[in-house]
Structures are given as structure tokens and as C-alpha cells.
Image: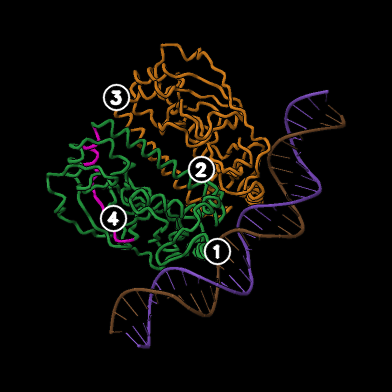
Chain colours: A orange, B green, C purple, D brown
Amino acid sequence: MTEPKTDNAMTFAEPIAETCAGSGKSDCKHGRGENGCDDCKVRLFSVCGALEASELDELDRISQVKNFPAKTMLFDQGALAGSVFNVTEGIVRLYKSLPDGRRQIVGFALPGDFLGLALMDRYGVAAEAVTNVKVCRFARPAFLNYVDGKPHLLRRLHEFAGHELSLAQDQMLLLGRRTAEEKVAAFLLNLQTRYGRIGAMSVNVPLPMSRQDIADYLGLTIETVSRTLTKLAKEKVVVVVPDGVRLLSTDRLDQLAAA
Amino acid sequence: MTEPKTDNAMTFAEPIAETCAGSGKSDCKHGRGENGCDDCKVRLFSVCGALEASELDELDRISQVKNFPAKTMLFDQGALAGSVFNVTEGIVRLYKSLPDGRRQIVGFALPGDFLGLALMDRYGVAAEAVTNVKVCRFARPAFLNYVDGKPHLLRRLHEFAGHELSLAQDQMLLLGRRTAEEKVAAFLLNLQTRYGRIGAMSVNVPLPMSRQDIADYLGLTIETVSRTLTKLAKEKVVVVVPDGVRLLSTDRLDQLAAA
DNA sequence: CGCCGTCTTTGACACAGGTCAATGCCGGAA
DNA sequence: TTCCGGCATTGACCTGTGTCAAAGACGGCG
């Protein structure tokens, strides 16, 4: 369990707004690399296919780039949901907390991921920048207005929500029924896959988040995460490197994860 | 952990179709008790407010009442999602399984709840009748067709999905960070609340599901569930009765659940 | 009525993972 | 360069929960 943080007077970030110079050039071709439109501020993976070039332009126009330094909060659990975010750089942790400080990280948002898409009036989880983070922010009213009257997009959003739910259910299975070793193995494979989707496919899996974060994501303690990683390293399944892990035997990990 | 079931050759239910006599009377007033329209086959809590009377009629028309005896399967994990269900009577368990038989129940569906609303092409979880179950079934194409062109409904559905996600995240917190006693306390309170919403508000909480089901829902073993219940009974927090529990001190439970 | 199968409870014991504490590692400040 | 503070690792030990086994409780059925 997480020990109550002494440093829990977490500052609410005052993000630095940028003028979005550079992405303002209007000769944008909306080239659809695997990162979505390369010129645009937003990085759409999942929703991209549902959008016309003109719609992408419009979406881009109502957006605003913001930076959040590492460890600052994008929004707090239960706060009025004023914005929808699209992460473009860095990693965000999403979590719920118990009054005594125990914390459960329900997910890490990587570049391309959306936050606040549920479109409920309050955020159900808190979001903090793990690394320095760049996001594309949409004011809720503008986004709602944009979405309304685009049933295909609404539909897409709904499918997307269904996918999120499915992932959450996978995580329940992991939290409720898997051993520490299985949890860590599944986590590493999962991260590898997700990094693969944003270009950095490799056996080198960066772990920008702390051991505490990993522990709070997997329902373990920091010591158990550390020990498990060491054990996997001793068994030549992984190599622990600064800020990451190199996967030696994905097969073995698959086996351990017992997907 | 769940021991591998010897009886896992679970039969795929061949539901008995009914002719829906009785609810076919067309003088339905669509009286909106807390159960939705009392005359209709469907029992809509969450989505109800978004529908006009005429739309409810239409929805009712494309629906079909089916019965599933206890322990039969409504659909399997990964199966083609051919139907959307609205539970009208009984309880359904939704779960994911590991290849070795370990099982995680991700939720219990009570009357009024929808199954398969994610509208993805495959079910992400399996669904089994805990008790005898009566559902209102919509063929996917008909339901999709019905939903399309009703943006307000689509919107509502999306909000509903967001709510589901939020519940799933609460469950992650429970699974990852709570003790056995906290889990059981939270479970009982949660059930009480949900029963309250469908009319049977009382300190008597029916537990139609087995101890194994509760264990698989809370990430515990059957023995731990049993012991915890016994402990709560010794402390005069609850009384264990046949197929249920009477809550003596909701306050104490709240305190234990540490919401 | 008694038998039997299934579920639940209870007890004794084991162990995965938590707790506590010491040490190591590293990067930034002076 | 050294000091310092914040992680991460490692070890020793403990405990909550799992495992195994036996004994009720209960309902269906002959």
C-alpha cells in the first residue's frame, strides 16, 4: 500500500499557454502518418479515421497548446470538467485516492491519448504529469459544440469509450487475480505495445514513471516491484537500464503474463 | 484464487422466446415510475429520460423478451456481439477469465441494467445468469438502426458509458488497494444502494450469488469472504441470513469501506 | 424418512507479498 | 569536488490472505 505522502499539498498547475506558432501555417496537408496529421496540434490515433480534413482543421482551430511541467496536476478528481485534453508529448498518470492516502493509478496516458472524453460534468479521476507534458486543450463547450451534429464522431467516441471500459476490465482481472510476477510482466508487455504504436518500437521499454507509480498501478508495493524486476533480470528475461527496461525474452514474458 | 472449475463446459443457453403478450397492449401510458415505463418490456433507468414516448414505443417494438435459467450463459467473452440486452428480472454476472480458470467478475447486472451497450463488434466479457433471468433483447442491427439518427440518445449512451468507466475505476481502487474487510463492506453497501434504486430499499440485502461469485468479484477466496462475513457478524455489524445479509450498522460499514 | 451432492463454515498451516530498516545510487547545488 | 535529498535496491521479518482439509448445513430426490 502507498504510504500517505507528506508532499500531498500538490500544487495545481498553472500551465503555460503557447501561441501555437509553427502549427499555424495554413498549408497543412493533413498527411496522415501513424501519428495522425503531422502538422496539426492534435495527435489523433483512435478518432482520426473518423474525421475529414476540414473537420481536423476546425478541431485544430478550437484547440490550445499547453505545457505542464513534471509533477503538476492537469486536473483533480471530482473537479468540474472544463476541458478535454489530447496528450501530444510526455506521460500523464490518472489515479483515484482513498482518504488515507492509498492510491490506485487507473492508467497512464501516452501521446495520442485523450483525457476527459467521457464528457461528464466532473472528472472521475485526477491527472498528473509524470514527465513534462504537452497537451492540446479543448474548452468543454467548444468541444461539445464541435461534436454535436457529427453523429459519426459521436459514434466513434462511444466505441472509443467502450474500448476504454474493456481495458479497465482487463486491469480488474490483473488486479484481482494475478500474481506480482504476472502483473509486472503484463505491464511491461503492455507498455511495449503502446510505445510501438507511437513509433518507438523496440525491446527497450522506457519507464519514465517511478517505482511507486508502477506499484500503485499494479496494486503492489514499491519493494515488490523492485524485487520482481530484479528477479526477471536474474532470469535473463529483462535487463534493467536507467529509466527503462530492455526486454530479452518477450516469449517468456508472454508466458508469465498468461494473457 | 478461483480453483479451475470442473464444470466449465458451461452450456450455451438456448433461451426461450416469449410472445410478449400483456405488454403488447397499445394503450400504454408510458407511466414513468422509478422503473421506467411500467407497461413496457424494457426497464430503463439511466437512458429513460432521454426518450420520447413514441421512441419508447419503437424501442419496445424491436425488442424481444427472453428467459435464461440460472447458470446459463447469455453470451461468451469474445463472441460476436449480436444483441443488446436489458435485464428486467434476476441477476447476471459479467466476468473475464484467465486460461487457467482464474476468474474475475467485473460486475453484476441488476434489473434495469444494459449489457452490450458498448456497441463493439465483440463482447468483452462473458455474461451468465446467476438466478433465473428475464431480459429484453434487441438485435444489434435493429438497435444500431434505432440509435442512429438520435444524437441525443447517442450522447446519453456515451455519458452512460462514461459512468460505467467510472465504476470500473472505483473497482480498480477496491481491488488494488483495499483490505478484505474493506472490500466486503464496500460490496454490501454498494449492493444495498443498487437494490434501493429498484425499489427494495431495506437493511436486508439479498445475496443471490454464491460466495464464490462474491470472492471472484472482490479478488478474494471463498474462505476469506466467509470469514470476513462471520467477523462482521461477531461484531454486530451485520446478521447473516439465508441468501442475504441484514445490515445492522451502516455507519460502521461506511467507516470500514473508507469511501 | 434418509441419502447425497453442493455450498458454506471453520480450523490449522503456509506463503506471497507487505513492513521496516539499512544501504546504495545518482544528480543537482554549492 | 563534496554534500545532500530523493529514489531504488536489498535484507530480515511479519502478517493477511491463500491453501488444504474436515465438518456442518441445506435442499432435492428416491
Could you give the CA–CA distance between mark 1 and mark 2, rounded to whole angstroms? 39 Å
Have a look at marks 1 and 4 and say if they share a chain.
yes
Tell us which disc is closer to us: 1 or 4.
1
* Closer to the camera in the image, B245 or A259: B245
Q: How many marks?
A: 4
Cα distance between the residues tagged 2 and 4: 39 Å
Badges 1 and 2: C-beta atoms under 8 Å apart? no
Q: Amino acid at mark 1?
A: Lys
Element marked by disc 2? helix
Q: Relative to residue A69, is residue B208 depicted above or below?
A: below
> Callout 2, which amino acid?
Asn
The spot of residue A235 in percent (x, y) is 64, 53
**What element does badge 3 sit on?**
loop
Q: Nearer the viewer, mark 4 or mark 3?
A: 4
Residue B134 belongs to magenta span:
yes
Whether residue A255 appears in this view of the structure is no
Residue in the foreground of this view, choosing between A192 and B14 = B14
Q: Amino acid at mark 4?
A: Glu
The residue at which mark 4 appears reads as: B89
Residue B116: give x, y in percent of width and height.
32, 46
> Residue A190's mark?
2
Q: Secondary structure at mark 1?
A: helix
* Residue A87 appears in view: yes
Name the chain under label 1. Answer: B
| Disc 4 chain ID | B
Q: Residue B231: which disc?
A: 1
The magenta span reads: B131-148
Q: Confirm whether circles 4 and 3 share one chain.
A: no
